[in-house]
Image (cartoon, rainbow, N blue to C red):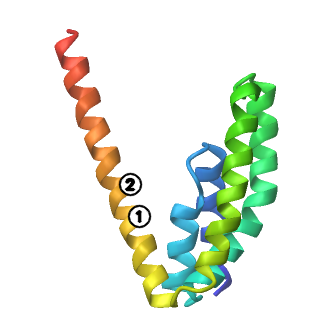
Amino acid sequence: MIFWEIVAGVLGGIVAGMGMGGGTLTIPILTIFLSYQQLQAQGINLISFLPMSVVALFIHMKNHLVAWKETWLLAAIGSLFSLIGALVANHINNIVLKKMFALFLIGLGIWQIVQLVKENKKTKSNK
């Protein structure tokens, strides 16, 4: 089992360090390969995200990539709604929560593909 925990940490850390949200990989690894319940996997992901985000933030700050004025409002609103989301998640059945996360990942994947297609069309039209 420790193999998959290492894989989850490595992949989640790399993706989180890039600013893309390591949970998109960490949570499926924890639920599929380590048989954690969805809510447990989300909690583990959030705890592991704290030190990873501090390291990534330090590096991004060092490279002057953090827009502080925009960050405070986003952080305040995000914190409020993460509290609401956590309270709601505690009252949702594990299977339903797992399906909601799967739909989120599918939607995110579709959105990324659409954005990539748009970007390619834009690049080709500029040539």
**Label disc, if present, on residue 108 of the rendered structure:** 2
Q: Secondary structure at mark 1?
A: helix
* Residue at the spot 65% in from the left edge and 59% down from the top edge: 81
Q: Are marks 2 and 1 in contact (CB under 8 Å)?
A: yes
Q: Amino acid at mark 2?
A: Leu
Q: How many marks?
A: 2
Q: Is residue 36 above or below residue 65?
A: below
Q: Is residue 26 above or below residue 35?
A: above
Which quarter of the rendered picture does the N terminus lie within?
bottom right
* Residue at the spot 58% in from the left edge and 68% down from the top edge: 26
Image coords of residue 3 (percent x, y): 63, 79
Q: In the rendered view, does 121 fall on the left or right side of 28?
A: left
* Residue at the spot 63% in from the left edge and 51% down from the top edge: 16
Q: Amino acid at mark 1?
A: Phe
Q: In the rendered view, does 35 fall on the left or right side of 75?
A: left
Picture quarter containing residue 82? bottom right
Q: Secondary structure at mark 2?
A: helix
Q: Check disc 1 and report the residue beneath it.
A: 104
**Label disc, if present, on residue 53 of the rendered structure:** none
* Residue at the spot 75% in from the left edge and 50% down from the top edge: 53
Picture quarter containing residue 4? bottom right
Image coords of residue 116 (percent x, y): 29, 36
Q: Is residue 96 above or below residue 67?
A: below
83 and 120: which one is in front? 83
Residue extending farthest top: 127
